[in-house]
Image (spheres, coloured by chain):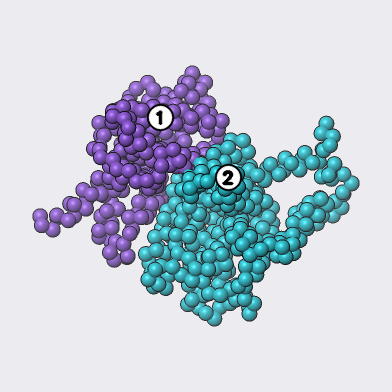
Chain colours: A cyan, B purple
Amino acid sequence: MIYRETGQFRTSYAEDQAIFRLRQDKIGIAVILAIAWIGIPFFADEYLLRAILVPFLILAIAAIGLNLLLGYCGQISLGTGAFMAIGAYAAYNLALRLPALPLLLDFLLAGLIAAAVGVVFGLPSLRIKGLYLAVATLAAQFFADWAFLRLPWFTNYTPSGSVTAPPLDFFGWVADTPREKYFVCLAFACLTALLAKNLVRSRIGRSWMAIRDMDIAAEIIGIRPMTAKLSAFAVSSFVAGGAGVLWAFVHLGSWEPLAFSIDMSFRLLFMVIIGGMGSILGSFLGAAFITVLPIFLNQAPGLVGIQLSTAMVSHLEFMIFGSLIVLFLIWEPHGLARLWQIGKEKMRLWPFPY
Amino acid sequence: MAELGPLLEVVLGGLMSGVLYALVALGFVLIFKASGVFNFAQGAMVLFAALSLVRLAEWLPFPLAFLLTIVIMTAVAWAIERLVLRPLVGQHGLILFMATIGVTFFLDGFGQTIWGSNVYQLDLGLAGPLVLALSIFFHSTKIGRALRAVADDHQAAQSVGIPLNRIWLIVWSTAGIVALVAGMAWGSKLGVQFSLSLIALKALPVLILGGLTSIPGAIVGGLIVGAGEKLAEFYIGPSIGGGIEYWFAYVLALAVLLVRPQGLFGEKIIERV
């Protein structure tokens, strides 16, 4: 009833190929964007912006990056954190060593550097797949961890190994309050989501999906596995690298290599699995879920009057994440995004399901 | 001989930790051979087994605690088989792999919730004979053959009358016991603590090196990685900043993957595209 396509006719190719074809969808996304761009900045307090919304948006971008690789191209990566680190340190060094460049260009170049490294570590995917690739990407993770910890050039020889980002100066406009930082992240998140959505609907996205579904068949119908896989690695690492830059420059401000450890990679993997493999919306849902759950777990026992130690809470977090992964893989491998889709189907028929 | 002293020491130290890597890798191989599942949770099982043993041994005589831990590990194996693997039968290997990552997190959290998360001391020697017995058992008995059949093709194995679920239970329990042995060995070296779980990550390159399906491969691979990383640290480490133990095994595994994807002793099962 609410979500019905009756009476909406698509009369041109442009309308037929639009991202949001239904009026309800258009209204929905307009409302969400209005809330994100106008509502939240007005009403959210500093804590909400700084501790929840900014990390959520950045992690959503990173999750989109991983989702392009894992959900669309079927290549597992346990090294997303490493590509984020590469982006972050590349941007740091570019800003430090080439101060003439505008910051936005630094960001772009950092993404490209991450993409180049991603392609190098994606090379094994041409010979191996699945589980073996997981090990190859783990190698990227550990190598990056080590390089940024032990090679002092990357951290500009700071004795502690922790580096501080320059001010966020976008052509004279400096983002330094949480609200401005939120706008920066929101802009990047919207842009990434739009580009990713269009990318997966295009020829290249379709070739990724063909590789994911059956690589041999894809090769026979004329898709080059090498181009498809390496482009997936490149785009995914570019997005992850960009997310890494934002994480370091916007969210953390100053950081050390530990910020991009394997924990980060696993978190992103969880976001993609829980949110939904092969869905851009799912990346956002997963990121929201994984960002909010630990905070909820920290607060909830106190609210109902149970006191838990912090160690206990972190163990509980482990258990809940672990069980959720298994449950989602068993019951809903397409994650929260699929649940949302089912919900839409229900709304379409409601209140007369039969 | 005087110059050989430190070298020998380095190699021996490396081989020692290599044996321990091999123990963890062995658990992986057992499960991979039998169910085609790449069990990321092996490291978590090592931690869980070691924690259980240490805590039980605090108020039980050691042999009893050991037996009880075996029972616990069998129960864990049963739970994993029943709750995780059975619903996912016939799924893509990648899905199963990610499910075991979930199991890893669950076991890590669960183990530390019920047993506590301090560092515990454990003093024990190696249990080499047990490993040997296991490898013979899996190589040359009827069950061993059934395991390989199951690994080859779930459906085909089931259709010739191999009880899939029982085989899985057996192999996961065995892997649990191997995890216990590995946990005892590592625990006596490092103390029983959370970092035990991370050893699983070191066992992955060992597996790639030795071949995913080969028990001797796991052992040889473990020794090579153990000795290799110590030697690399000793000779190359100082010139590029040290700490290369951290990634040496992975880069070695990557190199092996590019040249010989099936590993040193593995069966040639990799499909290339």
**Element marked by disc 2:** loop
Residue A195 position within the rendered picture, expressed as x and y whole percent measured from the top left: 67, 60
Quarter-wise, where is residue A177 in the image? bottom right
User: Residue at 25% across / 46% down in the picture?
Assistant: B15
* Residue highlighted by disc 1: B72
Crowd band around label 2 with a 10 angstrom C-alpha radius: few (<14), some (14–19), many (20+):
few
- The crowd level at tag 1 (other Cα within 10 Å; few <14, some 14-19, many 20+) is some
| Dot label at residue A10 | none
Q: How far separated are the C-alphas under marks 2 and 1?
A: 33 Å
Q: Is residue B242 left or right of residue A256?
A: left
SS assignment at label 1 = helix
At x 78%, y 53%, the residue is A28
Q: State which mark lies toward you, 2 or 1.
A: 2
Please give the residue where the numbered disc 2 appears in the rendered image. Answer: A305
Q: Is residue B94 visible?
A: no
Residue A249, how many percent across, how many down?
54, 68
What amino acid type should be assigned to the residue bearing mark 1? Ile
| Tag count | 2
Tell me if label 2 and label 1 are in contact, CB under 8 Å. Answer: no
In the figure, B192 relative to A54: above or below?
above
Visible in this render: residue B125?
A: yes
Q: Are callouts 2 and 1 both on one chain?
A: no
Residue type for callout 2: Gly
Outermost residue toward the top in this view: B161
Using the image, name the chain to which the residue with label 1 belongs.
Answer: B
